[in-house]
Each structure stands twice: as structure tokens, then as C-alpha cells.
Amino acid sequence: MKDKDKLFSKIDIFTVLQKQEQKLYEEIDNVDGNELLNIPVDDLCDYFDRKYQIEIPVLTENDISIGHDEVNIDVRNDFRRAILDKSQPVYVTGTKITFYVPFKGEKEAFYISPSPYGMSFPHAILGDAEIELSYSFAEHGDINLEKQFQSDLANIKDYLKRLSDKVKTFNSELRVKSKEKIMSRRKKLLKDKNLVEGLGFPLRRRDNAPQTYIVPTVQRKPTVQFPSGNKGLYKPEPELDMKEYEHILSVIYNMVAVIERSPKAFAEMKEEHLRMHFLVQLNGQYEGQATGETFNFEGKTDILIRVKGENIFIAECKFWDGQKSLNDALDQLLGYLAWRDTKTALLIFNRKRNFTAVLDKIPEVIKSHPYYKRELHYDCETGFRFVLHHKDDVSRDMILTILAFEVPV
């Protein structure tokens, strides 16, 4: 016969949360420095957020099942029976009813107390995916079985609710805490590198430097994979400043306002003619550096801005012709992007009416793309912003902004 466990009694929740946070910080401190600098911060935050979330079990009451057995029950202390010698057990054949209550979540959480103070703890047999509440009796009527089970079940649910309330704040703050710790260590690593490089001597590799980073096995939930990244020496790359990127997009967006105010002038224009109007505006800002149909990497891109021989902005213009056309345009654009090109845009022109439906379909297409990583907040009524990875490097993030416009027919 299995022994019953005293639930919610081994360790208090405050100690658990403290240790969990300590383990999070220790793992961030132990990540190889070059990996921490090479892997996108949001990817690292995703990993640590998933790994260190505490999942309080949830009982699936709709799947409760019952089993029954015959068992020997010692009745020597039953006052209803005339038993003179109570020094030895006196057995009769009785009944044992067991309620099997499935749960989803971490088994270990059933040992955590929501309070550091002693309480009357429930007892049950704890399995990997269910708890067993059993009741034995010699005679039917000895126990109000349903009432006792419902009382014990309610007690366990109350413990779980109190635990859930305690960990809710911790889970919601995990990503912020991990990001603060990552950014703090990145800042130190970059200062260290600047100091060493400023001394002018070659850097010696430590003999005990780790060759790989091994993620400890997590027993409480399926293993969370550490994001892949380059373990080589971190080298900062020049890239388009975010403010400059937003300025370029604002120039494009303002040009659309001109189109909307003069619909007849643009009604018959083809894709290349519309593109030329954007180029005129961009060249006014970038002294003739904006070009169209320029060869770049694996193809010809619609809009390309170069400064001092370096690409700072690449965009593609397309008329909306269904979801497949958008996916093809995205593949085409990604084919143009070299490793250094980290900020790009797709300009979508719609002449097929029902513009609201077009706007609804755009995120669906991008989120189903194999290079999609996440969506970013973008305060634009007909615009979207996403993070994708480079086709040859999952650690190289690219920002894609999509601006959709209704153009006159």
C-alpha cells in the first residue's frame, strides 16, 4: 500500500521564489560573455522567462475517476463491537474508495506551502499526473463519502489558489528582471572589452574558457532550449540608427498623404512610377543617395539608400494581390538583405478595395513565415512591425516594418 504524502508542507513559497530568482541570476552570470553579447537580448529574455516561470498545478476536475477495493480494516477500537482484547488487531473485510484527481502542472509544487507558518496540511498519495484521495470503512454508512471528498478537494484547491496568487507577481516580473540583469552584464562586458582593447596588447584566451555552454536539465517542465548564438569574439557592427530609420519611414508615410490628397494624379500609376515618387522625396533628404532597382546581395531591390558606400535602408514596393503575393514579396526582400542589413521595410499598395481585410491578413502572413520571431508594438494605423532573423543566422535580428496604403484606382 502506498504511503500518503503530507501536501504543502516541505518548503514555504517565499523561500522558493528567492531561490528561483537566485538561480536565474546565477545562470545569466554563467553564460559565456561572447554569447551574451552576440545573442539578441529578446531571445535571451524569452528563454529565461520560459525556464524560470513557476507553474502551479491546476486540477482537471472533469476527469476525476473512482476506484474501489476490498481491504482489511482493524475494528478493535470500534465501540459498537464487543471486543475485549484490544492489544491485538481485529480485522474485518471492508471497502476502500479512491478518487483519482488529475492535474496539469508541476508535481513539486504540491510540496510548497503558501505560508511559512504551520497549518493543518491535507494528505494524499501524489503521483506524476494525479493525486489519490482514498477512504476506507468497515460498514457502509460509517462515512459521508461525498461530503468528505468534496471537503478535502476544496482544501487542496484553496492551497493551490493561495500558491497561484503568490507566484503571479513573480512570473509577471521575470522578464523584466532577467532583462535588467542581462543588460547590466552586457554593459560590464563591453566596458571590459573597451579597457582591454585600449591597452593595445593581444588578448590571451583563458585555458579554462568554456568551449560550449550547457543548459542544465530542468526536471520540472520540458527542457527549454538556450537560444543558439555565435560563441566567437563579439564585434559590434555599424547599423542604421533607430531614429534615422523612423525618419525614413516618416518621409515615405508623408508621401502617401500627397497621394491621398491628389488621387487622380496617381490613379493610373504603375508600381515603378509610384516608387519613383518615393525616391524623389528620399533623395531630397539623402543628397541623391536613394536609388531604385539597385543590385544588392542576391537581387535587385526597389528602394536602397546608401551612405558612404554602406547600405543603411532597403525597401520593397508591391501591389496587394493576396496573401501569397505578400509572402513572395517578403521572400524577395529577405533575399536582398546582406548580413549587415538589419532594418528594412515593405510598402504594400492596395487597389482591390476591402482594405480592412487586407490589414487583417498581413500579420497572419508574416507570423507564419519561418524566419518570424516576434511582433513589436508600432503606433501606426496601417503599419506593422516585426522581428525576423537572417536567413543564414538565427542570432541576427532584422526589423521589418510594413506600411500598407490604399491607393486610388
Image (cartoon, rainbow, N blue to C red):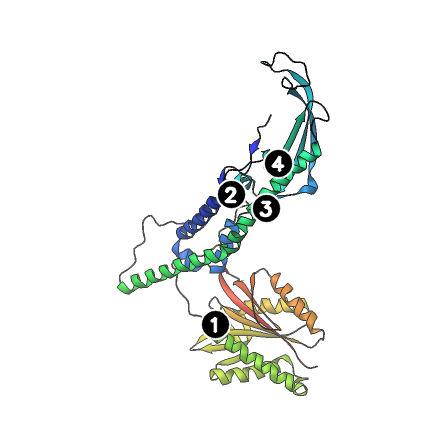
Mark 3 surroundings: few (<14), some (14-19) or many (≥20) residues within 10 A: some
Q: Earlier in the sequence, mark 1 or mark 4?
A: 4
* Looking at the image, residue 174 lies above or below residue 282: above
Quadrant including the C terminus: bottom right
Q: Gap in Å between the C-alphas at discs 4 and 3?
A: 17 Å
Residue with the mark numbered 4: 131
Q: Are marks 1 and 4 in contact (CB under 8 Å)?
A: no
Mark 1 surroundings: few (<14), some (14-19) or many (≥20) residues within 10 A: few
Residue with the mark numbered 3: 161
Horizontal relation, residue 119 to residue 139: left or right: left
Question: Which numbered dot is residue 224?
Answer: none
Q: Residue at x 64, y 38 (%)?
A: 153
Q: Earlier in the sequence, mark 1 or mark 2?
A: 2
Q: Gap in Å between the C-alphas at discs 1 and 4?
A: 54 Å
Question: Which numbered dot is residue 115?
Answer: 2
Q: Secondary structure at mark 1?
A: helix
Looking at the picture, how far across and down is residue 229, in whole percent?
46, 56
Mark 2 surroundings: few (<14), some (14-19) or many (≥20) residues within 10 A: some
Q: Residue at x 34, y 62 (%)?
A: 191
Looking at the picture, how far across and down is residue 63, in whole percent?
69, 40
Looking at the picture, how far across and down is residue 170, in whole percent?
51, 52
Q: Gap in Å between the C-alphas at discs 1 and 2?
A: 48 Å
Q: Secondary structure at mark 4?
A: strand
Q: How many marks?
A: 4
Q: Gap in Å between the C-alphas at discs 3 and 1?
A: 44 Å
Q: Gap in Å between the C-alphas at discs 2 and 4?
A: 22 Å
Q: Are marks 1 and 2 in contact (CB under 8 Å)?
A: no
Residue with the mark numbered 1: 242
Q: Nearer the viewer, mark 3 or mark 1?
A: 3
Looking at the picture, how far across and down is residue 100, in whole percent?
66, 35
